Image (spheres, rainbow, N blue to C red):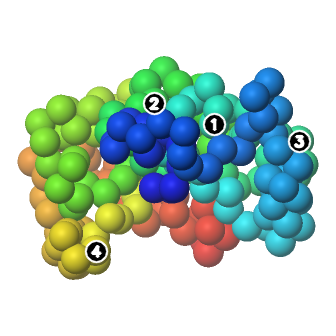
Amino acid sequence: MSDSYFHQRVVFDRKGVGLRYLTDDGRIIPEVKEILRIIADHDLVLASGHYPYRETAPLMEEARRLGVKRMQLVHPMPMHSKNTISEMKMLASEGVKIEVMGIASVNVRIVEGIRHLFKMIKEVGADHLVWASDSGQIHNPTHLEGMRWFVKVLLAYGITKEEIEKIIKKNPAKHLGLD
């Protein structure tokens, strides 16, 4: 995802570099269509992130058309993909799981990120969310430390145990076909 042209532009202010999956006229490039067919054939999860909604929505639509059943929006928060709550709700209504990402990551510990996270949980709804971790990277806490911190913060700010269990346990298990 950090190779996304959008990530390169918004995080590093680099223009003209990075990966794209749409043509200039907004169509999915043939190589990506082939990848989507492989995902569909093997019942894998399509995870897309660090791209804006205007590009993610057509990707998810094409994936559905080609038979992909499990899709996930990765890193929808303000720093990366810059998806709005209404955009996340739209994708969620179409069956795309929205990732509650990297709470242990330094970039989400800022006040704006925390507030956006709680708003996302309440407005998009725990039924549509799955947790993933940016923990374990050298500049972030271990997975265990990150998970503990995530749960403590959510509980402290009024996210219910039931919502947390859905986001961390139930939804990911179902999303991966493990339930």
The reply to whether the C-beta atoms of the residues labelled 1 and 4 are less than 8 Å apart is: no
Q: Position of residue 113 (x, y in %)?
A: 22, 38
**Of callouts 3 and 2, which one flags the residue occurring earlier in the amino acid sequence?**
3
**Of callouts 1 and 4, which one flags the residue occurring earlier in the amino acid sequence?**
1
**Which residue position holds label 3?**
65
- Which numbered circle lies on residue 56? 1
Which residue is depicted at the point 18% across and 32% down? 112
| Rendered position, 173 above or below 167 | below
Q: Residues within 10 Å of mark 2 (few under 14, many from 20)?
A: many
Comparing labels 3 and 1, the label whose residue is closer to the camera: 1
The reply to whether the C-beta atoms of the residues labelled 3 and 2 are less than 8 Å apart is: no
**Which residue position holds label 4?**
137
Compute the Cα span from label 3 to label 4.
Answer: 36 Å
Q: Amino acid at mark 3?
A: Arg
Mark 1 element type: helix
Residue 25 or residue 47, whichever sits in front: 25
Q: Residues within 10 Å of mark 3 (few under 14, many from 20)?
A: few
Compute the Cα span from label 1 to label 4.
Answer: 26 Å
Compute the Cα span from label 3 to label 1.
Answer: 14 Å
**Which residue position holds label 2?**
83
Mark 3 element type: helix
Which residue is depicted at the point 66% across and 51% down? 71
The reply to whether the C-beta atoms of the residues labelled 2 and 1 are less than 8 Å apart is: yes
Q: Residues within 10 Å of mark 1 (few under 14, many from 20)?
A: many
Q: Position of residue 74 (x, y in %)?
A: 49, 50
Q: Amino acid at mark 4?
A: Gln
The reply to whether the C-beta atoms of the residues labelled 3 and 1 are less than 8 Å apart is: no
